[in-house]
C-alpha cells in the first residue's frame, strides 16, 4: 500500500483583500473591543480569558478506500473551562487551521456564556476534504482522531458535537470509540448531536436554526427593524444550504418569510417570488447541490450575499462579509447562523449604515443549548418530548436575546460614565462610542465568565 502525505502546507489563501482574515486575530479583536466597556476588569485576568487553555495537535495515518495510507492532522482546542466542561463541534474541512480552531473554541466560550448554560468553550477539526473521501474513510478518520484525543475529551471535561461536514452518524462513531475505551460507565454524555436512538435529543438536528428563528422573532418583536414586528412576508437570503442553512430555510419559510436566494459551495439560486425549501432540499438530495433547480435562476455566491432582501443569513463559513463587499449587502438585518461570517471591517460598515447584525454568539447558540439539554437527558437517562425541548429552547433564546439588547441599551446609556471610569483607572482616555449587538453580547459574556473566575478564585 503506497503512503501519501495529504497534509497541506498552508490553508487555502484568503479572498483578495488586505483585511486581516485570521479568525483567531478577529476573535481577539472582538474581545478587546468588549473589554473597553468593562473598565474595572483586571487586565491580567482579561489576558487569561482571551487565550485558549490548551491546543492539542494529533497526526495519524488512515488506510483509505483509494488503496493509499494517508496521513491526517487534527486539532482540539479548549479555550476556557471556568463555567463548565469544554463544549464545541468537530469540523472536517481542507481549510481547518490551528487558529481557526482556536477562534471557534473561544466563540464557544462566549456563546455558552451569552445563553448562560454551564459550559466552557472548545472546538476540534481535522484537515481533510470529505468530498474526496468515502464514508468508510470518514469513519476511520473519526475513530482514530477520537482515539488520539484519548482522555482529553470526556463527559465532564470536553464534549464534542457536530459542525461543518460532521453529523449525527459521525457523533455515533465518536461515542462508540470513547465507549470502547471506557467500558462500564454511562458515556453517552461524551458527545452531543448523536442519533436519537443512541441518546440524541429530539430537536437537536433543527436546534441551531430553530434558535436563530427564535432570536430573529424576538429582535423583531422588540423593534430592531423599524415598522416590522414579525417575519410574515419578509424576504430572506441564505448563504450555505447545509445542516444549519437548509433547516433555517424551512423554518423561516414556515414562519411566513419568503426565501428569495440560497447557495452552497457550488453556487447559488434566486427566485424573487420565493423558493419552496422542500423543493430545494429534494433537488439537493438528487443532484448534490442547489444549483440548476427548475424554476429558479442560477447566480454566484456573491450575488446571494448582495441580493435585495430584508434578512441575510450567512450559514456557511467565516469571513464571508468583509470590508470589500459589506457595502453591497442590501439586507436590512443580518442574522449570523455561521460562526465568524462577518469581519470587523464589515461590522464597521454595517454600524455606519445602521444595519443591525445579530451576532453568531447569540444567533446560532440554539445548537449548543439543545446539546446541553441532550447532555442533561443522557446524565439522567431520560428522553424529553420534542415539544418540551423546543419550549425550553425558546425560553433560553428569548432570555438571551433580551439580555443582549438590554446590555446594549445599558452600555450606550452610560458611555460618559464608562469613559470617566477608564480615565480614573489610567486606561485610554478616548471617549467610548456606542456599541453594536456583537460588542453588547461580548460584554455580557466576558462579564459572566470573569465573574465566575473571580468568585471561584485563581488556584492555588
Ligand atoms: P454543513 O457542512 O452542513 O453546511 C455548510 C454549507 O455551506 C454547505 O451547504 C456548503 O456547501 C456551504 N458552503 C461552503 N462554502 C460556501 C460558500 N463559500 N458559499 C456558499 N455556501 C458555502 O455545516 P453546518 O453544520 O450547517 O454549519 C454551517 C455554519 O454554522 C458553520 O459556520 C458552523 O460553524 C455553524 N454552526 C453550526 C452548528 C451546528 O449545529 N451544526 C451550530 C452552530 C454554528
Image (tube, rainbow, N blue to C red):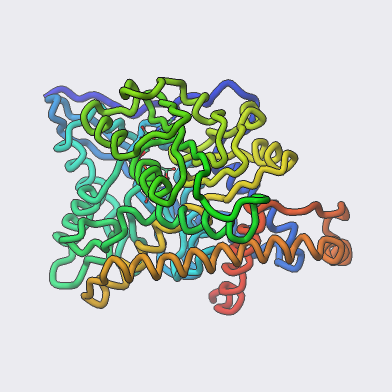
For image coordinates 50% across by 69% down, the residue present is: 116
Q: Is residue 373 above or below residue 125?
A: below
Asked whether 258 or 106 is in front, the reply is 258
- State which quadrant residue 150 falls in: bottom left
Q: Is residue 407 above or below residue 336?
A: below
Q: Is residue 148 visible?
A: yes
In the rendered image, residue 411, in percent from the top left (x then y), is placed at: 74, 63
In the rendered image, residue 302, in percent from the top left (x then y), is placed at: 52, 25
Relative placement, left or right, of 308 versus 279 is right
Query: In what quadrant does ligand 1 lie?
Result: top left
In the rendered image, residue 251, in percent from the top left (x then y), is placed at: 38, 49
Asked whether 336 or 228 is in front, the reply is 228
For image coordinates 18% across by 55% down, the residue present is: 177
Relative placement, left or right, of 96 versus 193 is right
- How many circles with numbers are drawn on the protein? 0
Image quadrant containing the N terminus: top left
Image quadrant containing the C terminus: bottom right
For image coordinates 46% across by 54% down, the residue present is: 213
Amino acid at each position: 500500500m503506497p503512503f501519501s502525505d495529504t497534509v497541506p502546507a498552508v490553508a487555502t489563501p484568503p479572498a483578495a483583500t488586505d483585511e486581516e482574515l485570521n479568525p483567531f486575530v478577529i476573535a481577539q479583536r472582538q474581545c478587546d473591543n468588549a473589554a473597553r466597556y468593562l473598565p474595572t476588569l483586571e487586565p491580567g485576568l482579561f489576558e487569561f480569558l482571551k487565550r485558549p487553555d490548551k491546543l492539542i495537535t494529533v497526526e495519524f495515518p488512515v488506510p483509505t478506500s483509494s488503496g493509499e495510507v494517508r496521513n491526517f492532522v487534527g486539532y482540539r482546542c479548549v479555550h476556557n473551562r471556568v463555567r463548565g466542561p469544554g463544549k464545541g463541534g468537530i469540523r472536517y474541512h481542507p481549510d481547518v487551521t490551528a487558529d481557526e480552531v482556536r477562534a471557534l473554541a473561544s466563540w464557544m466560550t462566549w456563546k455558552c456564556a451569552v445563553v448562560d448554560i454551564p459550559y466552557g468553550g472548545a472546538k476540534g477539526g481535522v484537515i481533510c476534504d470529505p468530498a474526496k473521501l468515502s464514508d468508510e474513510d470518514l469513519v476511520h478518520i473519526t475513530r482514530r482522531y477520537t482515539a488520539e484525543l484519548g482522555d482529553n475529551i470526556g463527559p465532564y471535561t470536553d464534549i464534542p458535537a457536530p459542525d461543518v461536514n460532521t453529523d449525527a452518524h459521525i457523533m455515533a462513531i465518536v461515542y462508540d470509540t470513547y465507549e470502547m475505551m471506557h467500558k462500564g460507565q454511562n458515556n453517552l454524555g461524551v458527545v452531543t448531536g448523536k442519533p436519537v436512538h443512541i441518546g440524541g435529543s429530539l430537536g437537536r438536528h433543527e436546534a441551531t436554526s430553530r434558535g436563530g428563528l427564535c432570536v430573529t422573532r424576538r429582535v423583531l418583536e422588540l423593534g430592531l427593524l423599524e415598522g416590522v414586528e414579525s417575519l410574515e412576508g419578509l424576504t430572506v437570503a441564505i448563504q450555505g444550504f447545509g445542516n444549519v442553512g437548509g433547516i433555517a430555510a424551512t423554518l423561516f419559510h414556515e414562519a411566513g418569510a419568503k426565501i428569495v436566494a440560497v447557495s452552497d459551495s457550488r453556487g447559488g439560486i434566486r427566485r424573487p417570488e420565493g423558493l419552496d425549501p422542500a423543493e430545494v432540499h429534494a433537488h439537493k438530495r438528487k443532484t448534490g447541490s442547489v444549483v440548476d433547480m427548475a424554476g429558479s435562476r442560477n447566480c454566484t455566491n456573491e450575488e446571494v450575499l448582495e441580493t435585495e432582501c430584508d434578512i441575510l443569513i450567512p450559514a456557511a463559513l467565516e469571513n464571508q462579509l468583509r470590508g470589500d463587499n459589506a457595502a453591497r449587502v442590501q439586507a436590512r438585518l443580518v442574522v449570523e447562523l455561521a460562526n465568524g461570517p462577518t469581519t470587523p471591517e464589515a461590522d464597521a460598515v454595517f454600524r455606519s449604515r445602521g444595519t443591525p447584525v445579530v451576532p453568531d454568539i447569540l444567533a446560532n447558540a440554539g445548537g449548543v443549548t439543545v446539546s446541553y439539554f441532550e447532555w442533561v437527558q443522557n446524565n439522567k437517562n431520560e428522553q424529553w418530548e420534542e415539544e418540551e425541548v423546543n419550549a425550553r429552547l425558546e425560553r433560553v433564546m428569548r432570555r438571551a436575546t433580551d439580555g443582549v439588547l438590554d446590555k446594549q441599551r445599558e452600555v450606550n446609556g452610560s458611555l460618559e460614565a464608562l469613559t470617566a471610569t477608564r480615565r480614573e483607572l489610567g486606561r485610554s482616555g478616548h471617549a467610548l462610542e456606542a456599541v453594536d449587538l456583537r460588542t453588547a453580547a461580548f460584554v455580557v459574556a466576558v462579564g459572566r465568565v470573569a465573574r465566575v473566575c473571580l468568585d471561584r478564585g485563581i488556584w492555588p
